[in-house]
């Protein structure tokens, strides 16, 4: 079977596979179980394989490349225009197979296991940080119902909270006071988890040459540096810093025609977490200077 180009529509258990030859003739069109996908490609000659970016895509791309295939990942919005008729697995995988062979298609760089490990650390840290913020806001809201108003900001709130809970004349019932102590203890436990994650990130930054170079930029710390290194598999895909800014979604949306340029708000495309880190670090740096 002289298949040269293959499209794979990834799913949870059953994948759709569509393959064509050099002349564009369909040679492969079938559904394959998760456990049978890689063994099927072991028996095939090296070919170009396209997949839409989704959960598990980087894993299969790494495995297929290990088998000698040229596995590439595309953003779903770049594949959608090539889908014929309605949306179903057959039309989706045919569109993927067609789009991956285009010479001007944009591809997502395949991430290594190490990069995905660092990203997992960042995701867990963000989840714990969001939990801490939610508990602090909940605590401020509940105390406000008893006439105790804590200042905004994590540090100010945590500083004013113990004296407010110890003060016996503020009218807080004993049961509520005990509950507020429990919430404060949970916030303290989250502080410990976040500190542990921060130390792990700092250790990763010390051992990463790319992260060390990024940290030389004013306003870029270990968290932002390691997040960028883990998110961008190869910085060479960007021709300039403007392209990197566009990838982050930090450029104006453009709707230009007939030689007339129309610029709107920033696109906010790309990784929300990474864009937020970059903006936050720059704002903090400018406020301190």
Image (cartoon, rainbow, N blue to C red):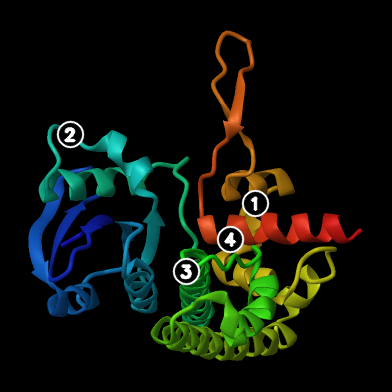
Element at label 2: loop
Of the 4 image quadrants, the one containing the C terminus is: bottom right
Please report whichever mark, 1 or 3, sits nearer to the chain's N-terminal start: 3
Can you name the residue that lies furthest to the right here?
289
CB under 8 Å between callouts 4 and 2?
A: no
Q: How many marks?
A: 4
Q: Which residue is mark 2?
A: 84
Which percent across, then down, holds residue 52? 32, 55
Q: Is residue 87 left or right of residue 227?
A: left
Q: Which residue is mark 1?
A: 238
Please report whichever mark, 4 or 1, sits nearer to the chain's N-terminal start: 1
C-alpha distance separating marks 4 and 2:
34 Å
C-alpha distance separating marks 1 and 3:
37 Å
Q: Which residue is depicted at the point 76% across and 56% down?
A: 282
CB under 8 Å between callouts 1 and 3?
A: no
Residue 38 versus residue 159: which sits nearer the camera? 159
Which percent across, then down, holds residue 80? 29, 39
Q: Which residue is depicted at the point 57% across and 72% down?
A: 230
Residue 132 versus residue 101: which sits nearer the camera? 132
Q: Which residue is mark 3?
A: 134
Please report whichever mark, 4 or 2, sits nearer to the chain's N-terminal start: 2
C-alpha distance separating marks 4 and 3:
21 Å
Q: Is residue 72 left or right of residue 198?
A: left
Please report whichever mark, 3 or 2, sits nearer to the chain's N-terminal start: 2
Q: Which residue is mark 4?
A: 274
Q: Nearer the viewer, mark 4 or mark 2?
A: 4
């Amino acid at each position: 079977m002289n298949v040269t180009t293959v499209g794979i529509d990834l799913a949870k258990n059953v994948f759709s596979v569509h393959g064509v030859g050099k002349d564009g003739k369909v040679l492969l069109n079938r559904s394959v179980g998760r456990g049978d996908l890689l063994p099927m490609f072991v028996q095939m000659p090296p070919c170009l394989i396209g997949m839409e970016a989704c959960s598990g895509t980087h894993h299969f791309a790494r495995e297929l490349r290990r088998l000698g295939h040229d596995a590439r990942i595309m953003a779903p919005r770049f594949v959608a225009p090539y889908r014929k008729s309605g949306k179903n697995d057959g039309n989706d995988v045919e569109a993927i197979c067609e789009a991956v062979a285009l010479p001007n298609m944009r591809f997502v760089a395949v991430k290594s296991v190490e990069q995905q490990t660092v990203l997992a650390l960042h995701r867990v840290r963000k989840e714990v940080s969001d939990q801490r913020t939610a508990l602090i806001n909940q605590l401020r809201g509940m105390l406000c119902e008893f006439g105790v108003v804590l200042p905004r900001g994590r540090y100010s709130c945590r500083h004013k909270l113990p004296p407010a809970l110890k003060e016996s004349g503020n009218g807080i019932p004993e049961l509520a006071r005990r509950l507020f102590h429990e919430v404060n203890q949970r916030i303290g436990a989250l502080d410990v988890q976040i500190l542990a994650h921060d130390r792990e990130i700092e250790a990763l930054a010390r051992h990463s040459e790319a992260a060390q170079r990024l940290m030389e930029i004013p306003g870029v710390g270990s968290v932002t540096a390691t997040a960028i290194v883990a998110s961008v598999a190869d910085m060479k895909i960007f021709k300039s810093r403007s392209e990197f800014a566009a990838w982050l979604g930090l450029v104006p949306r453009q709707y230009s025609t007939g030689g007339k340029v129309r610029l709107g708000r920033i696109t906010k495309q790309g990784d929300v977490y990474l864009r937020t880190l970059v903006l936050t670090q720059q704002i903090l740096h400018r406020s301190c200077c």
